[in-house]
Image (cartoon, rainbow, N blue to C red):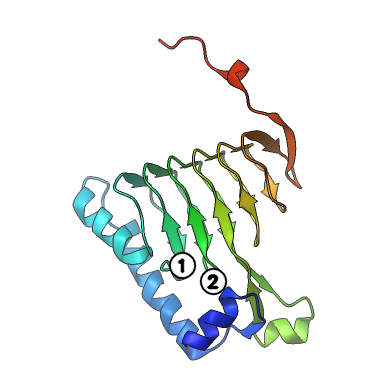
Amino acid sequence: MKKLMNDLHTGKWVCGFAPEIGEMLRTTENLCFRLNATAPDCKEEREGLVRRILGSIGESFLIHSPFRCDFGKHISIGDNFIANFNLTILDEGMVTIGDNVFIGPNCGIYTITHALLPDQRNEGVMKAAPVTIGSDVWLAANVVVLPGVTIGDGAVIGAGSVVTHDIPSHTLAVGNPCRVLREITDEDRVESIG
């Protein structure tokens, strides 16, 4: 199993139908099911389940249900993380998320890709590439982040975007495929609230 995971993490093509992978997927799916069936008022129980599912997560976080991931242990999240409803992370590759990250509803972060030829795909041929999301990032609603992408610190990804390439720090990026619109500057500061 260690070799298979190492091959996935180094971008090699592997057989995703290996029994060990199926067992790991089932274990995590059961934990996610328990998390999603646990009432929001049961804060300690929910936090304990999240910590069992993920590789690591900071002190302060809020993950609304439903939440789904493949392995969980390949996900590392910093402090002050907020994920709205229906976040899906396919973490065959490593997923690293910094501090102060907000993720809107219905977002997906994917590290896995399958073979293009049907016969190979039907045999389970797949490979993974890591995803890195820096600190102080906001992914608005319905954002999809594809394998191998890095999103820099302070970036904002607009609703409905499909992120296919790296996004530089402190930029506003939108669209399908996602493209940088402009830099985020102090001119974007909200003057007053309330």
Give the CA separation, mark 2 to mark 1: 7 Å
Residue behind mark 1: 74
Element under disc 1 = loop
Q: Earlier in the sequence, mark 2 or mark 1?
A: 1
Of residues 183 and 192, the one drawn nearer to the viewer in this rendering: 183
Q: Is residue 141 left or right of residue 121?
A: left
Residue 161 at what x, y percent from top left?
68, 44
Q: Which mark is residue 159?
A: none
Q: Amino acid at mark 1?
A: His
Residue behind mark 2: 92
Residue occupying the point 38% across, 51% down: 65
- Asked which quadrant contains residue 49, the reply is bottom left
Q: Is residue 117 left or right of residue 138?
A: right
Element under disc 2 = loop
Residue 85 at what x, y percent from top left?
45, 46
Q: Is residue 179 above or below residue 35?
A: above
Residue occupying the point 31% across, 44% down: 60
Q: Is residue 60 visible in this depiction of the protein?
A: yes
Labelled pair 2, 1 in contact (Cβ < 8 Å): yes
Q: Is residue 5 above or below residue 49?
A: below
Residue occupying the point 67% across, 82% down: 13
Q: Is residue 67 visible in this depiction of the protein?
A: no
Q: Is residue 55 above or below residue 155?
A: below
Q: Amino acid at mark 2?
A: Glu
Of residues 111 and 68, the one drawn nearer to the viewer in this rendering: 111
Of residues 96 and 118, the one drawn nearer to the viewer in this rendering: 96
Q: Residues within 10 Å of mark 1 (few under 14, many from 20)?
A: many
- Of the 4 image quadrants, the one containing the C terminus is top left
